[in-house]
Amino acid sequence: MKKKLYYLLCVFLGIMVMFLVFIPSHTVAQNSPMEIKIATGNEAGEYYSVAKDLEKFALTKNLDLDLIPTRGALDNIDTVFRHETIPLGVTQSDLLAFLNTFANKDEMARLTAESIRAVLPLYDEEIHLITRKDINSASELTGKRVSIGESGSGTSTTASTLIYHLDIQPKAIQALDIKRSIDALRKQEIDGFFYVVGVPAKVLEEQILPEDNFQVLPLALPTQPNDEFLAKIYANAVLPANTYSWQTEPVNTLKVKSYLFTFADEDCNYVTPVAKLIRENLAWFQENGDPVWKKVNPKDLSQLNSQRVSSCAAM
């Protein structure tokens, strides 16, 4: 009798264990967060910081944002284009123009440029040209050593464009990431470097000291009659005095807009949730996230050619 009762008890416990194990796992599977991958740029950069804010808040809305570090804005475009599992990235508006410039010479560039779609405008990124204080203007970098930013970054594209249009002819051009650029300038291995980032840039405040004797040089586009191309891409900007502890005077420079982007044939189920997350919770991001969130205005999307705006953005 005891033996029979023992077996019955084992069967009952076995059924209960199966029930308890099966039901929670089934529930978790049903309610597991949707995973969406975003190409974010270098982990030391602003794009990654903004994406970390998105990742943190998204979990409260049952979204699992998977951040994919890259070398920067240009690499983000290539990453999203080449990988079907990565539907979103962050880039700069001048990179779209850069790709269009090469569209007639390269089939891959043409396909990429034609299919990029903006999902949401983010923030303006100011162009920093940083040197020691013995250099007085951008033109004085002719014959000197300049870092244009890490290969694949938006900075490298912007810097190359401006070097050409400002007729700067460096003796040597290096492709160093931001921390390496700061260190190289400090050691006098280079004479200046470009960095495109929304202000205030944490890395510039934390890595540069007043005693380094660095400065941000003024930048302005040369006047070119009937040339609206550059004027539409780069707008005038001012870095207020004391944007950084080592920069005590206001500086006139240029800025470029950053965008959350996707491609024309992307599944909106993996794009629209992120766009809605930003639109509907922008106040939270502006209060709790990276300071650049305060410059985000979704209405800026209306300034783009409608053919360049993703259909997923309006859903």
Image (tube, grey):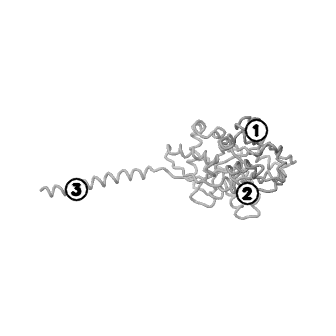
Left or right: residue 124 compared with residue 57: right
Marks 3,1: beta carbons within 8 A: no
- The answer to which of marks 3 and 1 sits earlier in the sequence is 3
Q: Which mark is residue 168?
A: none
Q: Amino acid at mark 1?
A: Val
Tell me the element at label 3.
helix
Distance Cα–Cα, label 3 vs label 1: 76 Å
**What secondary structure is found at the residue carrying circle 2?**
helix
Three-letter amino acid code of the residue under disc 2? Leu
Real-space Cα distance between discs 3 and 2?
Answer: 69 Å
Query: How many other residues sit within 10 Å of disc 3, few (<14), some (14-19) or many (≥20)?
Result: few
* Mark seen at residue 10: 3
Q: Percent x, y for residue 238?
A: 76, 38
Mark 3 or 2: the one toward you: 3
Residue that numbered label 1 is attached to? 238
Residue nearer the viewer, 180 or 118: 180
Residue 83 appears at what percent x and percent y? 59, 60
Marks 2 and 1 close (CB-CB < 8 Å): no
Left or right: residue 256 compared with residue 50: right
Q: Secondary structure at mark 1?
A: strand
Residues at marks 2 and 1, CA–CA distance in whole angstroms: 28 Å
Please state the horizontal and vertical placement of residue 7, each as a whole percent of the image: 19, 58
Contact between labelled residues 2 and 3, with CB atoms less than 8 Å apart: no
Question: Residue visible at 65% across and 55% down?
Answer: 71
Q: Amino acid at mark 3?
A: Cys
Mark 2, residue position: 99
User: Of circles 2 and 1, which is in front?
Assistant: 1
Residue at image position (76%, 40%) is 237
Q: Earlier in the sequence, mark 3 or mark 2?
A: 3
Give whichever of 208, 187 is nearer the camera. Answer: 187
Please rate how many residues cluster around mark 2, counting C-alpha atoms within 10 Å: few if below 14, some from 14 to 19, many from 20: some
| Mark 2 vs 1, N-terminal side | 2
